[in-house]
Amino acid sequence: MEIRADARIPFSRETVFAAYRDEMTDLLPYLPNVRGIEIKSRKNSGSVVEFVNEWRGGGDIPAALRAVLSQSVLSWTDFATWRGDAMVCDWRTETHAFTEAVQCKGQNTFLDDGADRTLLEIRGTLEIDAKKIRGVPSFLAGKIGRAVEEFLVAKIQSNLVETAKGLAKYLEERHRTKS
């Protein structure tokens, strides 16, 4: 299933790209659905930067419900390759729960959108093979997989837009502080 989200951010694409790549952990206060981001590795090679980040979600889930959900359901690892020369980020996400059943990958493209404005295009795919989830009857796997994909894609698209909005607020506050 296709992941598709766009966000307009009122700062230059160089500023947005660099902040998105290098200051993601500083954005936590602006991301209500995320409880933590841990940088596991960063490798620089010219204009290419490769990251492995571990995310802990569930910030928008009531604490009582979080207590009964396993941490693996609310966590994922993001593998990202940032190419500064093209202003794109190729990414792949591994869920910590149902890892063998979920495939998620895509690309974020940072485009000029007028003077000191950026259009962030987020494109990707999410595929769930419910046959690989223990306990799901094979005759229901297709229907369950599609339903879960639809739910997750809607949630992911919303979260990606919220992340872009959080980035815009972060940059606005940083800009005000410097002025």
Image (spheres, rainbow, N blue to C red):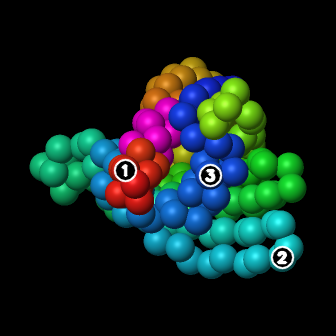
Q: Quadrant of residue 150?
A: top right
Q: Which residue occupies 46% across, 41% down? A: 168
Q: CA distance from mark 1 to mark 2?
A: 33 Å
Amino acid type, residue under disc 2 in the picture: Ser
Q: Is residue 29 visible?
A: yes
Q: Position of residue 152 (x, y in %)?
A: 50, 33
Which is the main secondary structure of the residues drawn in magenta? helix
Q: Which of the 4 image quarters holds residue 126?
A: top right
164 shown above or below 14: above
Q: Give the amino acid at mark 3.
A: Thr
Please report the residue visible at 77 percent of the width from the left and 48 percent of the height from the top.
88
Give the magenta-colored segment's residue range.
159-169
Q: What residue is disc 3 on?
A: 15
Q: Which residue is mark 2?
A: 45
Residue type marked 1: Arg
Circle 2: is it few (<14), some (14-19), or many (20+) Cα within 10 Å? few
Which of disc 2 and disc 1 is earlier in sequence?
2
**Which residue is identified by label 1?**
176
Residue 71 percent across, percent down from the top left: 35, 61
Residue sitting at x 28%, y 49% = 59
Asked whether the beta carbons under mark 1 and mark 3 sit within 8 Å of each other, the answer is no
Tell whether position 72 is magenta: no
Point out the image quarter for the N terminus.
top right
Q: Report helix, strand or loop for mark 3.
A: helix
Discs 2, 3 touching: Cβ within 8 Å: no
Where disc 2 sits, the SS reads strand
Instruction: Pick whichever of labels 2 and 3 is earlier in the sequence.
Output: 3
